[in-house]
Image (tube, rainbow, N blue to C red):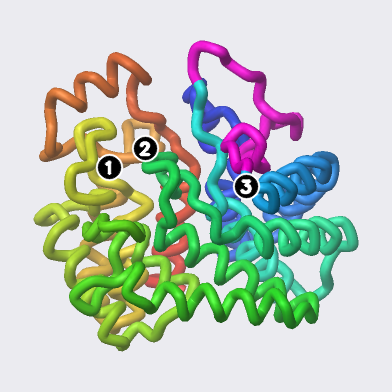
Amino acid sequence: MPASTVHEVYRYGWLRDGSWCAYAMDRGGRPDASARWHHWVAETLLRHEHRVDEALDAVATGTVDGRVMTPARFTLAGEEEPVDPTHEWPNFQTDCYGFWLWAAVDHVRRNGGRVDSTVERAMRLVVRYLMGVGETPCYDCWEEYPGLLHTSSLAAVSAGLRDAGDLLGESAARGQAEVIRQRLLGEEFTLASGFVRSAGGDTRVDGSLLWLGVPFELVPLDSDVFQITVKRVREELRAPGGGVRRYLGDSFYGGSQWILLAASLGRVALAEGNVEEARELLAWIQGTATSEGFLPEHVAVDVCSPHMLAFGGKRWGATAAPLLWSPAMHLVLLKELRP
């Protein structure tokens, strides 16, 4: 499952994007599609097992380089993307591997509990990778801000190690997941009793922080740290009557509103019992569909910077539509509102 079927830049298989899509397929009555994707990921990762060893050696010797670390995406043939000397696209993102473990375990649990042998081998490989690399500074889930420890990235790693550790009986993975979870609750990643987007002084809230509560369940929904985080998302990132921006100061396509994050906030609202807000967000998402019925990655309405919106269009072209994690998360929210 590529990130997008029509946008040249996104015609790759991202572990994170595909995880959201497989997660939605399981909830939309297509576990066969989810199973095929997880098997594709497993075969791809096992074929590149040497990259895991290279990455672990780099961390052990203090020679971490994003070009050495295991890729966050592959071509649809399951190979590493060709190197473009004119443009280096960020490819070192630990959250992708945490996302895949989390989604793979969710798929297994929802479909009888039996682990495909190929998938199990790949899961154990990824556990070994994240045990050594999971707390290494990298690009965030938006492929930005390299060299930092990002809250939502560590959250994905923790959730993936926790769930894979439970499924595979790897107590070391479960223990490391809890160490990371406790670290996230400390002063590095919180300020004024709420989560911040990254350690090292970035005090902004980020829409991806919603995932610590739903779906990762790393903190209780009624905990102060999560409630304050959600309050900041609503006050600082949600557009009136609209969607959710990634973070304050976002310049990508001018700081547009993201369908993925609108659905994420809708799921949190629903878990809190706020059905009205969840329905408002669902209606907004559905209202963003193109005339063909496709959902884009984000919507350039009431942007923060018209100048950067124009720059994004000139550099990357029109917003990707469809961007597959958008309809995936729309489906998840829709199913939860109308089971």
Q: Identify the residue under disc 3.
A: 62
User: In the figure, is residue 198 to the left or right of 43?
Assistant: left
Q: Residues within 10 Å of mark 1 (few under 14, many from 20)?
A: some
The image quarter in which residue 302 lies: top left
The disc, 2 or 1, on the residue closer to the chain's N-terminal end is 1
Q: Who is closer to the viewer here, 285 or 216? A: 216
State how many labels appear: 3
Image point 32% across, 74% down: which residue?
187
Amino acid type shown at disc 1: Thr
Q: Position of residue 165 (x, y in %)?
A: 71, 76
Measured in 3D between alpha carbons, the distance from the residue under mark 2 to the one under mark 3, in whole angstroms, is 40 Å
Image point 21% across, 70% down: which residue?
277
Q: Who is closer to the viewer here, 70 or 293? A: 70
User: In the figure, is residue 131 to the left or right of 85?
Assistant: right
Mark 2 lies on a secondary structure that is loop
- The stretch in magenta equals 63-87
Q: Nearer the viewer, mark 2 or mark 3?
A: 3
The image quarter in which residue 320 lies: top left
Residue 10 drawn above or below residue 270? above
Amino acid type shown at disc 2: Pro
Q: Identify the residue under disc 2.
A: 296
Measured in 3D between alpha carbons, the distance from the residue under mark 1 to the one under mark 3, in whole angstroms, is 46 Å
Q: Residues within 10 Å of mark 2 (few under 14, many from 20)?
A: many
Quadrant, the N terminus: top right
Q: Position of residue 163 (x, y in %)?
A: 65, 75
Q: Identify the residue under disc 1.
A: 288
The answer to the question of whether label 2 and label 1 lie on touching residues, with beta carbons closer than 8 A, is yes
**Visible in this render: residue 7?**
yes
Residue 121 lies within the magenta run: no
Q: Nearer the viewer, mark 2 or mark 1?
A: 2
